[in-house]
Image (tube, coloured by chain):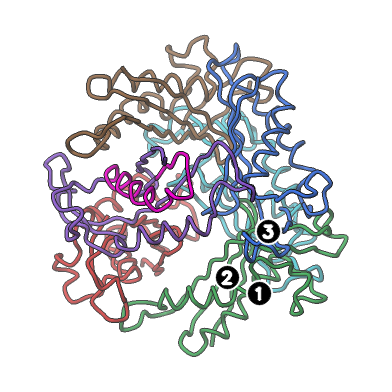
Chain colours: A cyan, B brown, C purple, D red, E blue, F green
């Protein structure tokens, strides 16, 4: 549940400070399942998501240093969260990671990339 | 898609400026359907919803005069929107009006009252 | 999945022959649960729903004799289905029956009444 | 919200004139985001969707000249809408376009192809 | 996510040991909102739900002493959870409490009663 | 609606006998649609799904011989169901088959592979 503003004329009324609830899904895709018949430990994955999302939740993104000078669109945030989660899971997960941010029932964005 | 802050210690991290996407549903309940077999003209209802919600969308509620000194909780906003819509439809709708604000998949609030 | 037209100027473009997928929910409300700890046998309820909805599915409602001269709005259909199901369950269910027709993610209508 | 009939014995009861509510999603996939950190302007995308879908909404597809002699299955409509949107966005979007038609909670079809 | 069996001929194949994921919603209804403009503290409500549901999650209900000799239907579980939550919130919430257990997209049961 | 236990320390409380409702989706992907403008006959697909899922529904998977010595994780079950459906449709469908098991609103697994 974040506040932000999108400071480019391209965004019309969204240039004003407003907010959004984002539902964030992470999909981990692998060629094989491991000896426990899983792709990733879902509790670990949930902890990583929580660790990455907590510093953003209940915040005004305009005030956070890592977003200074960046347009925090849904696409941008999907890539940002992808990068953060990729670093967290890199030691035990190899495959494709897809992050989806659903900002409402009718709008969402995803970022997909490899974790090597 | 609004920004706001809830300035009471009761709200923990939500005291900070943050945001939310609200999905707003309006239910119109009547004892009888009219000569067109409807409770209310759904296009008219959609226009009223749009008229009432537009001044809030893409805004920081902390900056709007009507909310000065009020905690804009989901419950409060449900009642506020109920009152606004009630005034709009009063001339052609009599019955019960229920407004529901869904702020995420796991949290929502409703306000229900008569339109006389 | 029905076709129909709504022949009154009140309905604008819906006066033309068009169609809709309706998802129909039935809620059975009772003061007490029975000796099997249920309100109604869900398989029986599903069979009744199927029996009542089958004659409407994949049909043009404009061609069905029971709807001749009626505006088959969602509200009207909710009441029609309520009446049909009420007759079917009357011998073994006493309480409140609520029928909801969801015609899309943003529009639905319900009819609620007693079964005695 | 369309009416249509599927005139081939393969479709059983769907050979009769019936109808459906389709929820249409469009996904635009690109290798990079642009200088505004977006894949496509969501307002523009919404306008294109509206422009392409309006001539079909509240219609009996059996009566529309572009569908004469075609079985308007969900798969066929997904491809048709894909082609229409592709032409509309071609001048400013390069990438993959996926169109999904959800005809109910349990049935949907997609068409995916490049926009060059 | 529980396992259980329903030992009465009324339940056909559900007499066998099987399982279900239940999504549990709690609605708190009050005449007035408090000085913080809320009906109930949503964090407190979430903690109560967790406290009441944890002893059931990942369990075979047939093995739990409190359900010995009871048919653990969805209706029964809704009432059981209602009673447990009612006791937890009684000291600070007065109003109506409704508990809904969704066992799948097509089946759910609720129990509604006063908290005094 | 199945019961099972996951007998490996990796699964924490899920080592106990518990249960789950799985919603199973099958996606059939082909390069071309056939002479009826479809990818697959949806009634046939529904029958195959039913045939493959019926022997699992209302069962304790720990008791079924085909799962003896296997950890019946969601990933494993997705692959198992994929293999079963692939054999059923092989004579009339060539393309990609993706099976998704949704075990709750927040957890799901898919298995995707070719049908040749």
Tell which tag, 2 or 3, sits nearer the viewer. Answer: 3
* Callout 1 touching callout 3 (CB < 8 Å): no
In the rendered image, which quarter is residue E37 located in?
top right
Residues marked 1 and 3, same chain: no
Boundaries of the magenta span: C74-99
The quarter of the rendered structure image containing the N terminus of chain D is bottom left
Label located before the other in sequence (1 or 2): 1
The quarter of the rendered structure image containing the C terminus of chain D is bottom left
Q: Which residue is mark 3?
A: E8
Magenta stretch: helix, strand or loop mostly = helix
* Callout 1 touching callout 2 (CB < 8 Å): yes
Mark yes or no: residue D41 visible. no
Residues marked 1 and 2, same chain: yes
Q: Which residue is mark 1?
A: F79
Residue D47 location (% of width, % of height): 29, 48
Q: Which residue is mark 2?
A: F99
Chain ID of residue with mark 1: F
C-alpha span from label 1 to label 2: 8 Å
Above or below, B46 against C13 in this view is above
**Residue C98 highlighted magenta (yes or no):** yes
Tell which tag, 1 or 3, sits nearer the viewer. Answer: 3
């Amino acid at each position: 549940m974040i506040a932000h503003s999108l400071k480019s004329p391209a965004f019309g009324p969204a240039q004003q400070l407003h907010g959004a609830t984002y539902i964030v899904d992470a999909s981990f895709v692998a060629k094989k399942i491991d000896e426990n018949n899983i792709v990733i430990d879902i509790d670990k994955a949930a902890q990583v998501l929580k660790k990455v999302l907590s510093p953003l939740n209940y915040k005004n993104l305009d005030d956070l240093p890592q977003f200074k000078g960046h347009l925090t669109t849904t696409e941008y945030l999907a890539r940002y969260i992808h990068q953060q989660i990729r670093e967290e899971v890199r030691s035990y997960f190899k495959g494709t990671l897809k992050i989806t941010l659903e900002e409402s029932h009718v709008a969402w964005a995803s970022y997909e990339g490899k974790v090597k």
